[in-house]
Amino acid sequence: MDILNPIQVSAYGMDPRKLKKEFGDQLCFWGGVDTQEVLPYGNVKDVEEEVKRRIDELAPGGGYILGPVHNIQPDVPPENICAMYKTAQEYGKI
């Protein structure tokens, strides 16, 4: 196995910090942006903070593909989707 997809941070045993520490030198991680609460019900600021948190937790040293935990559902405001990608592009290059 080369990649773990999805990283569903709200699920039991899926603490991103622990996963990165334990398996970060062996696996690539994909996902992590919450699709149950943050994307559908959060505001743009919530989404920006979520994206930055996932990058901080999972990207150091490489091996992280940022994305939503699962498919983006129709109830997600378009501005939240844009905020996710914009923040990833800007913050992910630090």
Image (cartoon, helix red, strand yellow):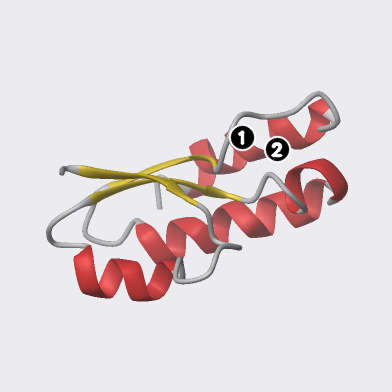
Kindly identify the residue that appears in the image at 67 percent across and 59 percent down: 49
Q: Residues within 10 Å of mark 1 (few under 14, many from 20)?
A: some
Kindly identify the residue that appears in the image at 51 percent across and 49 percent down: 91
Q: Is residue 89 left or right of residue 83?
A: left
Residue carrying label 2? 83
Number of residue marks: 2
Residue 87, horizontal then vertical, whole percent: 60, 43
In this view, 70 is above or below 43:
above
Q: Residues within 10 Å of mark 2 (few under 14, many from 20)?
A: some
Kindly identify the residue that appears in the image at 45 percent across and 71 percent down: 13
Q: Which element type, helix, strand or loop, lies under badge 1?
A: helix
* Residue 46, image quadrant: bottom right
Residue 68, horizontal then vertical, whole percent: 57, 39
Callout 2, which amino acid? Answer: Ala
Q: Which element type, helix, strand or loop, lies under badge 2?
A: helix
Alpha-carbon span between mark 1 and mark 2: 5 Å
Callout 1, which amino acid? Answer: Lys
Query: What is the quadrant of the N terminus in the image?
Result: top left
In this view, 35 is above or below 78:
below
* Residue 10, image quadrant: bottom right
Mark drawn on residue 10:
none
Q: Is residue 59 left or right of residue 9?
A: left
Residue 9, horizontal then vertical, whole percent: 54, 61
Residue carrying label 1? 86
Mark 1 touches mark 2? (CB < 8 Å): yes
Residue 5, horizontal then vertical, whole percent: 38, 42
Q: Residue furthest front?
A: 12
Kindly identify the residue that appears in the image at 43 percent across and 66 percent down: 16
